[in-house]
Image: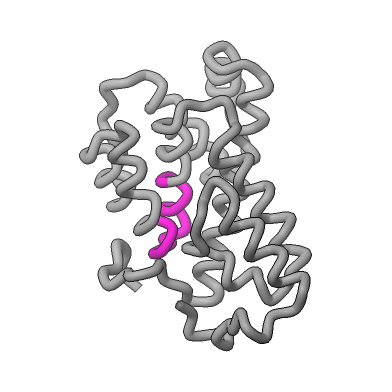
Amino acid sequence: MSKRLPDFNAATASDEQKAVLQDILSGPRGNLNGPFLGWIFSPELAQNAQKLGAFCRYQTGLPLRLSELAILVTAARWRSQAEWHIHHPIALDAGVPADVAEALRTGQTPTFADADDKLIVDFATELYETKRVSDATYGAAVARFGHTVVVNLVGLLGYYALVAMTLNTFDMRAEGQTDLPFDE
């Protein structure tokens, strides 16, 4: 799972670690794939982050396709091997076009058939590249999704950047991952 962290042993876990594991496994994810076995070394961070992640993944008000598209933009920006490996098939199943995903993975500008897809990618790209969102893109996002969902989109992008940083720092791979979508 990680070359930089010790192996986690559930049998010797603290009560706090066991509580986090139980909450993750009984929640909407149902598995520990991703950053969770990295975060488990700080149970308080793990508990707070996994709760934020469940909200950002399942309750933003965005359709699954657009949430997963935003996650792919983040995974590509951070060149996060495990994040891409986990979310790419979910994104495709949710309706993200394969050519859009591939363009993101290879650092190209996608061609969009769907205006919402373009808006999500433009929003995330502006935020990652310029550290701001232009008035035009912000206005289009609010007009399309409303203020609450735009706030949630920013949260989703921030959360998945945290996930990518965790996975990259601790050189973590997804369960069963053998291929790497990004050169290292």
Extreme-left residue of the structure: 99
Q: Is residue 164 above or below residue 115?
A: below
Say how the picture is coloured.
Answer: one colour
Q: Is residue 75 magenta?
A: yes
Q: Is residue 184 magenta?
A: no
* Front-most of residues 154 and 32: 32
For the N terminus, give its image quadrant: bottom left
Q: Residue at x 47, y 63 (%)?
A: 33
Location of residue 151 with respect to 42 vertically, above or below: above
The image quarter in which residue 97 lies: top left
Query: What is the quadrant of residue 11 in the picture?
Result: bottom right
Location of the C terminus (image quadrant): bottom left
- Residue 107: x %, y % from top left: 32, 50
Task: Kindly give the residue lying farthest to the top in the view shown.
Answer: 143
Residue in view at x 62 percent, y 16 percent: 146
The residue closer to the viewer here, 145 or 106, is 145
User: For the magenta stretch, what is the residue range?
Assistant: 72-83
* Secondary structure mostly seen in the magenta stretch: helix
Q: Is residue 145 above or below residue 10?
A: above
Is residue 24 found left or right of 103 in the rendered image?
Answer: right
Q: Across the whole image, how many numbered discs are drawn on residues?
A: 0
Residue 105 versus residue 30: which sits nearer the camera?
Answer: 30
Tell whether 27 sits left or right of 49: left
Picture quadrant where residue 49 is located: bottom right
What residue is drawn where x is 29% and y is 36%? 110
Residue 53 picture location, percent across and down: 61, 48
Q: Residue 71 in the image: state x and y as whole percent.
A: 46, 45
